[in-house]
Image (spheres, grey):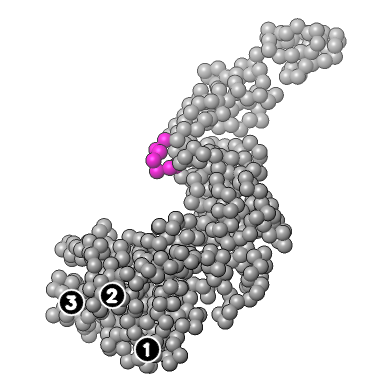
Amino acid sequence: MSKISRDSDNATGARGPKTLVEKRLSDAGVRVERSASVEEESKACYYHDNQRLPTKTSGNYTIHGGDGLVLLDVDDKLEELPEETADLPSTFVVESPHGGYHPYYALKDDTGISNAQTDWGSIRYEGQYVVGPGSTIDHGECGDGKANCPSEGTGEYEIAVNKPITTLSGDYLEHLREVCASSGSDKTLKEDYGGEQITLPDDTPADEGERYICTEFTRHSTRLAGEDLMDLLRGGTGSYELRRDDETGINQSAADYYALELLYGAFFYRGEDEGDARKLALSVFKRYCRENPYDKTGNTRKWLRKGERYLLEQMDAVQEEFDVGKWHRWRRREYENGFNAEEHKPWTDPEKDGKPSITELDIVRAATRLLASPVTPEQVAEQYGLDLSALPPTYCGEINTPSRSWSSGDFVGRPTASDIGELAHQINPKRERSYHEWVLKKWLKTEYKEVAMAFCPLRANGERYVYYPADLPDPENARYVRCGGEERDPELPEETTEQEVMTDGGVSMSKSESHNKLKQIRQARDGDESSTEGPEVYTCPIDGCSRTVVGEPGHLMNHVNQASDDAHRHRTLNEDLEVVVHWGEMNWGPGIPAFDSLPSTDEKVSVCEKDDLWGPGAPS
């Protein structure tokens, strides 16, 4: 008898399924905010971002794996599972409307745990989900093609085993790792499917690609475009008219072509080269095709019937005929039945619900990328689907002070909001510079880590706040960085542990060390007594100067020696950090001999009567 089989402990009591599953997750010690909304009466989740509590979702919802929660999607009867899997300990289980099961397990150590396809179903972990209990599906629209699907009516995901989520360890955990490992090693083999052979997708690019199209890409496209892509991947037609006249089937060749075209464009838009975009598109398509082996009319998917050669020929045709302009128009589609002619005018920016349009966000992205990266307007125009022909080809980096890149030593720009707003205004003159700046700053405050802002107090041009794409290195002289609505310390490159910077006194110190001491310096300036813990903090004794250093008094001596303002001129610090005034270096006025020490009152009066002039830097 399977340990994870359905038992009598399935009552939910007065609490609803969402409340109950939320409590089970909390009691298991895993992240509870792992739910996203699912389309009504379906199990299709198009947007994986903004995961929240199950009770904070409306209607159907997901439970996402990862972060210590592994989900099994069991298609077979629990009694028919392989012995090792059937012997997994009893845990919280949800039954699907088609008679499948979703056991939930917690993990303290997820080493070796990955998404995997098995003979009995699948293991869902990073970036994948199951539909939560209480959700319903329309059997007439689900398109699973399963033998036990009634093809009509409504089915519900129900709690089959209502008990705490079990934490796997020991032999149980090791067995699950073996299943994941063996599934991954088979991905390079060929599998017979309907008399033809197919090459199974590699999990690594499939995981990466699926994560991108379900999270980041949804922020770069309209909701309609996202729904089109996901419906095509799951065996539907999106908003395309691909059903045969007799309603007996779908033009699968056209549907597969559109799915591959949209995927290829999404990865090309991400910045992948042609080879990587192709690999990612094929991997994601294959994963969804195997998970959804029947189209929405119940027919087996064409790749599974025709084999690998069919799919590769479709991909070749996509790459040969790919039209980036057409793809961008699809990405910005707002209308299901055709398109509005205004969408062909890239500067049209209809605000909807008080939010900037996809086009406006692309303009700000393009302006930021142009000013912060060594790219040409032609490259950026193709990536974002914009007309930048009016910009000079060498525009990048011209209006801002460059900063050295960590990785290559090349100089790249770190523009201000004003710089980006001005360039965005040149791209789209129908919007004022201030509007583009507002979009940029609002974008920075979201949780999406696309753009970063760094505070650089030592910038030569006085503009201290700079902006750049978050995938670029932080400026070397940044004091702090804001990204994704959070503030953090600037990041050092992975290959470097100690990046040297120069203090005001010309003394080098590691960047990591300087960041660690920054808090101490601030405490000292604020008079916080706790700042005396650890290395001693020294403050410049010159009146009006607040320069503070940590640990090395020599740094402060160098600062005073090299400062050129009137307060520091002709002064140094001795070993006791006392101010020494060099009277003999001072200019006392024309014809006045230099004093070797502080002049007496009579000497001052004599000088005043003679020329009535004290030169710059002379004491009163």
Label 3 to label 2: alpha-carbon separation: 12 Å
In this rendering, the answer to whether 182 lies above or below 476 is below
Question: Residue 620, image x and y in percent?
Answer: 76, 19
Q: Secondary structure at mark 1?
A: loop
State the residue in front, 536 or 586.
586
Q: Image quarter for residue 382?
A: bottom right
Kind of residue sitting beneath label 3? Leu
| CB-based contact (under 8 Å), mark 1 and mark 2 | no
Query: Which residue appears at 31% of the width and 63% of the height?
Result: 203
Query: Pointer 2: what residue?
Result: 73
Q: Secondary structure at mark 3?
A: loop
Kind of residue sitting beneath label 1? His
Q: For residue 571: magenta?
A: no
Label 1 to label 2: alpha-carbon separation: 19 Å
**Secondary structure mostly seen in the magenta stretch:** loop
Neighbourhood count class around disc 1 (C-alpha, 10 Å): few under 14, some 14–19, many 20 upward: many
Query: Pointer 1: what residue?
Result: 139
Query: Pointer 3: what residue?
Result: 81
The answer to whether residue 505 is seen in the rendering is yes
Question: Residue 142, image x and y in percent?
Answer: 38, 84
Lower position in the chain sequence, tag 3 or tag 1 = 3
The answer to whether residue 156 is seen in the rendering is no
In this rendering, the answer to whether 574 lies above or below 199 is above
Neighbourhood count class around disc 3 (C-alpha, 10 Å): few under 14, some 14–19, many 20 upward: some
Kind of residue sitting beneath label 2? Asp
State the residue in front, 99 or 295.
295
Q: Image quarter for residue 171?
A: bottom left
Label 3 to label 1: alpha-carbon separation: 25 Å
Question: Residue 301, image x and y in percent?
Answer: 34, 79
State the residue in front, 292 or 611.
292
The segment highlighted magenta reads 492-498
In this rendering, the answer to whether 42 lies above or below 24 is below
